[in-house]
Image (cartoon, rainbow, N blue to C red):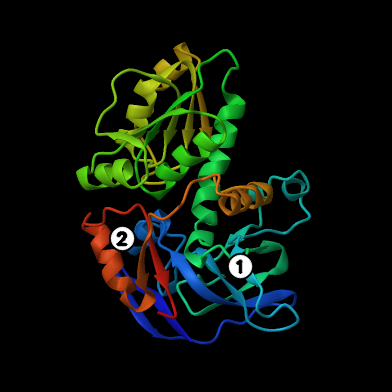
């Protein structure tokens, strides 16, 4: 099969690789759409030691079961593979499973390929009328759905339901969409890239600006750099909540003194539970997250150029989705 392989820092090759092979109980999925995630970009830049070269990246995917009694079933993929039996899994917090694996990290190859193998419990059926490009958004949208849910659960009921999202990439936009679907009408996105701000405003119907004065009861850091954590620390209202989703860099930025004196709750959020993923997929299918027509589609064979364009900041769309069979 063909795959886009991470071969070293800022090096990707589109080449033949061994056919994906699943373990007992896993299905072979013919991938039709696979999105580029910020974590894929971190690996591409050599910033993620969890993803050593050579490796097939990609974990935001949808496709069709290729073989067996379920051949032809259209599915979107929850890439987080867990044991299903530990205390975290038993309590519905599968994302905290100590033995969790995710495709695009060893030992599991990713979905920037024509095929990938996945367990049955990681598959959600996609209705015939839902395009694969939209179904592939279930994973990044679930990340933000999980963060929005945890943040709203932590927000004091007396506080105004108003939010600031820092970062207008796919995770930031998804956080805004999730918050709006959960009843938060006043959501603003802070995004420094002028082209992306225009895209968010004109194509996605979002309120976006380079800077927003004042504070918000709920702040989502969808970037995760020291500078954005500093901005989140300053923007969170007294008694408010910061939900931290981004993994841009490991340390720095938080104003712990202000957070302590003003009783600001900080929540680190990672991926999603299996229920969050199913709820997000259903919200997509029901149209509750909007038209979701903003990704840019490119062939997988042109994936290396897509990564270079993202690296150079020349992509206005919040998401590029690669099509392995284009």
Residue designated by label 2: 45
Residue drawn 63% across and 51% down? 282
Q: Position of residue 23 (x, y in %)?
A: 69, 77
Which numbered tag is attached to residue 128? 1
Q: Position of residue 244 (x, y in %)?
A: 46, 36
Q: Position of residue 110 (x, y in %)?
A: 50, 70
Of badges 2 and 1, the one in the foreground is: 1
Q: Is residue 218 above or below residue 277?
A: above
Residue drawn 46% across and 86% down? 17
- Mark 2 lies on a secondary structure that is loop
Q: How many marks?
A: 2
Q: Nearer the viewer, residue 46 or 231?
A: 231
Residue drawn 33% across and 72% down? 303
- Mark 1 lies on a secondary structure that is loop
Image quarter hosting the C terminus: bottom left
Q: Nearer the viewer, residue 139 or 252?
A: 139
Query: In the drawing, does residue 199 fall left or right of residue 113?
Result: left
Circle nearer the N terminus (2, 1)? 2
Query: In the drawing, does residue 267 fall left or right of residue 224?
Result: right
Q: Do residues under tags 2 and 1 come within 8 Å of each other at their CB atoms?
A: no
């Amino acid at each position: 099969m063909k795959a886009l392989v991470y071969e070293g820092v800022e090096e990707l090759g589109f080449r033949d690789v061994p056919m994906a092979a699943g373990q007992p109980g896993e299905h072979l999925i013919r991938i039709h759409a696979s999105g580029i995630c910020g974590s894929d970009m971190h690996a591409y830049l050599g910033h993620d030691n969890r993803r050593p070269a050579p490796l097939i990246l990609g974990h935001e995917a949808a496709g069709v079961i290729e073989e067996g009694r379920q051949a032809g079933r259209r599915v979107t993929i929850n890439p987080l593979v867990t044991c299903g039996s530990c205390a975290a899994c038993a309590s519905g917090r599968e994302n905290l499973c100590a033995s969790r694996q995710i495709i695009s990290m060893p030992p599991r190859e990713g979905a920037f390929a024509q095929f990938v193998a996945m367990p049955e419990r990681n598959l959600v059926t996609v209705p015939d009328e839902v395009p694969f490009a939209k179904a592939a958004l279930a994973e990044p949208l679930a990340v933000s759905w999980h963060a929005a849910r945890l943040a709203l659960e932590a927000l004091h009921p007396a506080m105004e339901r108003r939010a600031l999202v820092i970062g207008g990439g796919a995770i930031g936009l998804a956080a805004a969409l999730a918050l709006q679907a959960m009843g938060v009408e006043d959501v603003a996105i802070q995004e420094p890239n002028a082209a992306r701000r225009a895209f968010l405003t004109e194509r996605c119907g979002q309120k976006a600006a380079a800077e927003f004065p004042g504070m918000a009861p709920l702040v989502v850091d969808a970037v995760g750099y020291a500078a954005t954590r500093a901005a989140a620390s300053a923007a969170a209202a007294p008694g408010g909540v910061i939900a931290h989703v981004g993994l841009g860099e490991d340390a720095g930025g938080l104003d712990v003194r202000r957070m302590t004196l003003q009783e600001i709750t900080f929540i680190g959020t990672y991926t999603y539970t299996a229920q969050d993923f199913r709820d997000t997929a259903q919200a997509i299918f029901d149209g509750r997250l909007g038209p979701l027509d903003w990704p840019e589609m490119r062939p997988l064979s042109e994936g290396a150029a897509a990564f270079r364009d993202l690296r150079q900041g020349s992509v206005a769309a919040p998401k590029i989705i690669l099509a392995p069979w284009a």
